Amino acid sequence: MDYARPIMWNVPHWAAITLYILIPIVIGLFLFGLIWRVRKWFIGQAEPGGGNLFRQLWQALKEALQPRQLVEFVRDAFFQGRLKRDPYSLLMHLAIFWGMVILFIGTALATIDQDFAYLLFNTQLLQGGFYLWFELALDVFGVALILGLGMAAYRRYLVRPKRLEPPPGPVSLWDKFPFLTFLFLIAVTGFVIEGLRIAEGFHVEKQIATADTAEAKGRVLDQVALREQFEMSPEQKDVQMKRITAEGKVFPAAAWAPAGYGIAKLLAPLPLGSLRTVHAVVWWVHGLLAFGLIVAIPYTKAFHLLASPLNLLLRKPGPVGRLPVVMESGVDSVRDYTWRQLLEVDACTWCGKCQEVCPGYNTGFPLSPRDFVLAVDGRLLRTPFKDDGETPSLHSPHPDPLPKGEGTISSAVLWSCCTCRACEEICPVGVEHPRLIIDMRRRLVDQGQIDEGVQDALMNFQRYGNSFGQSPRKRGDWLKGLDFQLKDVRREEAEYLWFLGDYAAYDQRARAVTQTIARVLHRAGQDLGVLLEKEQNAGNDVRRIGEEGLFGMLRDKNEKALEGAKFRKVLTTDPHTYNTLKNEYNGEGAIAGRPVVHYTELLDELLQRGTLRPARRLDVTITYHDPCYLGRFNGVYDAPRRVLTALGVRLVEMPRCRENSFCCGAGGGRIWMKDTPGIEERPAENRVKEALRLPGVRCLAVACPKDFVMFQDAVKTVGAEDRLRVADLGELVFEALEG
Amino acid sequence: MNIAVVLRQVPDLIEPLEVAGSGQALDWGAASFILNESDDHALEQALLLKEAGGGTVTVLALDFGEVDNTLYAAAAKGADRIIKLPMDQDTPPSPQAAAARFAEAIKPLSADLVLVGVQAHDELDGVLPPYLAAALTAPYAGVIRGVKAGPEAGTVTAFKEFPGAVMARLTVKLPAVLGILGADQPPRYVPVSRIRGAMKSTTFEEPEVAASVPESRVAVDKMYPPVSAAHAEMLSGGEDEVAAGIVKILAEKGIIK
């Protein structure tokens, strides 16, 4: 062994013994906290599908180990893939994460080197060339960690985005634990210890250099008591002393630790005694900080270090448009959530990215998805394991949010959600906020605590199968404006069963668009049929309001009507209908095995195939709004854009587009709710203003009947009727065909 | 407090009403039915009183007009007993006749308070609540918008609305019949799952009720859609077309030349 990692350098025996006494205490406190926190997840319910806990965990693990899931997990957990939309955050988190990981691995290797290889086998793992690379890696990633923490500090203390403000109520047991400061100090003290050790080497090397003979050099080593600093057998110490005498280098690997080396150069002027004293002190500070951090992890928000990757690993695979339902009567206390949901809230990093993209939060509604999740987590950590029947409700007795978070959630917060999934899409650790919110809404519905407008809509759904309170017989009234016939699929077979949805069939403005789309498809020779009065609302938004029983009723009625219908594919213009028919209808029902197609997908196909040939290019600059239930829920982003491109328009994207599209505010039943007093603006107005800020854009293209209505209203309320036209994609195609 | 609530099914006006071949009545077989709106408020008021002060709520309805769904919904909302009075005819009885039957069914209940919607849109010879009060020999107050526990036992405080934006606070000695126009809060929503639950757990009581009903002195000669005496013409098209249309009409009427 020429040279190896110095073990317990400058650490007296009493300190080493104290350290070994502290280690099991630290591990014990950590494990106690870890078990305490993990057990909290399992006060929750089983996930849909049931089974005992081990069976569920085994199932979750089996799903997680599928190749595709595994690739996603590695990308998102180890390379922060879900931060790709925010390069600053991505770089910062990569630096901190990988800095910590490599330093952790380095510490683990050092432990193996010291406590196993050396103590048990009198050899060392960290020696020779491997040790050199070890030193370099730790220094490089240590510097990366400090730089990442610097980026975090810059953002937190200088940029100070609102999303990083502390949550309104208590969450963990020690919310103010200075996690990043601890990390920073651990990294810095690590480098200082290294620097002090190398500086000691410089001192010795300088003195050896002044000695002429080997004996004189040996005397120098004896004078500075260097031999005692090495923790190894007397024979190995002899080898090291000879090596140092011959080479004149105490630490041959010093140059491979550039950060420590640089610090050593700075500290070298200090006297040797001071170097050793300061080294001993900083060594203790470093060790105690590290122990403090380890102990703190389960009791502070630092727990996300463990819970976040685990949550990403155990995420439920399957379409995001399929809402899992466990408790039909909804969530009252944290015990009513599933264990997977409780793991989710515990995995929250408090980063507030969900808040930053939330249409409710951004327009003055009393909803912050982050504060909602943290309120649930805070309550979870204060709920005893044993269910004594006294678990307090998560629901606030007050309809309006209280200024200070006291761990309960008001109905105003829950009803502010548009279920648009912007929060879920951006969450770096895979929290599914809308599902958590809808679960609580279900309890409000069960208790009859709902908005008057929503109640009217639900009553109308119960009675008439549509939200408009119109006769089911009028669902086909829009056909009267056409000079051709659509088939009645109950009587004759059609290629496409056109499932209208409510707005496309009943709303006067959207109905005109439906007619235009029908004309376009008729011109393309498409074989279309309808269910007429047998069609009921598909139930997408009913389900997301939290009226699961009514959703089931609507679905049953539609399934029954579909059973008697003859069709090969389902077509719809409504993304909400599209989502629920595609993802939430009975897997063995009438739709099973038949494609559900959005009309933008069909138009795209017809234009690509040349079945539809525009007679002219549309000379207009257009921006396109991605409907939430088409884009974020079902990944249909490109078909509508290809349609617009085929029409020859100049397409300009809004800053918030595709996955980051900003909801019009209609989703999750909000379209039926009364205006919320005190908000700054309606989400649709916010969106229209975004479109108006784009230079040259005169048209906002939409692909959803609800968007069409919402944005038409918003254009009027912001006074931009003469500056911005709201047009459906179908209308634009029709205009291009007309020439 | 034991409260009896009378619920009535009325034709749903969402579908056009059809007159029967006789020309003297609606074609009841073609109509769809919903709960009379003010009866819905009466039920809500009863449930609020029960929640505030305890007691029971008994719902009564005639077996007419798809009433089962309404009764299951009432049970799901919190009604304790459901009484469905069998009908020997497939047309609704007159308010007088209905009141006599309801009164006979209510008498054995020893109800402290009877709540019923102040009116229904298919009533012929008067409104039901005062007939019911008379048959029960109980005091009656109508057009009530809210009921609370009274200042002393055996009373309730009711709020009556008069035309011209005048309200009155009444102390009503029990037992009494109140004609409800509106409850203290809008009727609650009852989720479908609860209605389904009620369908499984609720049993209707269906007592035979014998009531002597005086013959109505009002008879329908003819039932028909109203004949329009005047009409509005809707102008459509662009601004220029509409303006030209207005000018044309004004010229035709001789208002402008």
Image: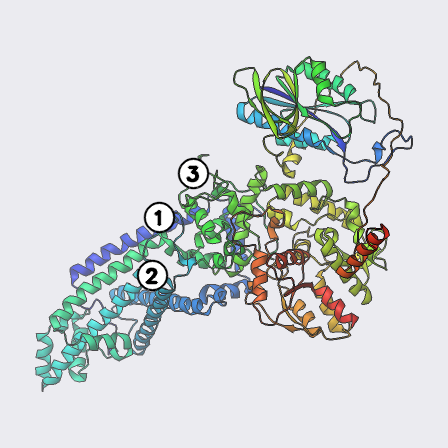
For numbered disc 3, what is the local secondary structure? loop
Measure how far apart labels 1 and 2 are at the Cα level: 17 Å
Chain for numbered disc 3: A
Q: Do the numbered discs 3 and 2 sit on residues whose CB atoms are within 8 Å? A: no
Measure how far apart labels 3 and 2 are at the Cα level: 34 Å
Residue A534 spot, x, y in % from top left: 78, 47
Please name whichever residue, A308 or A733, is drawn nearer the observer in this view of the structure.
A733
Please name whichever residue, A583 or A104, is drawn nearer the observer in this view of the structure.
A583
Q: Residues within 10 Å of mark 2 (few under 14, many from 20)?
A: some
| Viewer-nearest of discs 3 and 2 | 2
Image quarter where the N terminus of chain A lies is: bottom left
Q: Amino acid at mark 1?
A: Leu
Residue at image mark 1: A173
Q: Residue at x 42, y 58 (%)?
A: A162
| Viewer-nearest of discs 3 and 1 | 1
Q: Earlier in the sequence, mark 3 or mark 1?
A: 1
Q: Earlier in the sequence, mark 3 or mark 2?
A: 2
Q: Amino acid at mark 3?
A: Lys
Q: In the image, are marks 3 and 2 on the same chain?
A: yes
Q: Residues within 10 Å of mark 3 (few under 14, many from 20)?
A: few
Q: Which mark is residue B143?
A: none
Residue at image mark 2: A180
Please name whichever residue, A460 or A689, is drawn nearer the observer in this view of the structure.
A689
Residue at image mark 3: A386
Horizontal side, residue A362 vs residue A265: left or right? right
Chain for numbered disc 2: A
Image quarter where the C terminus of chain A lies is: bottom right
For numbered disc 2, what is the local secondary structure? helix
For numbered disc 1, what is the local secondary structure? loop
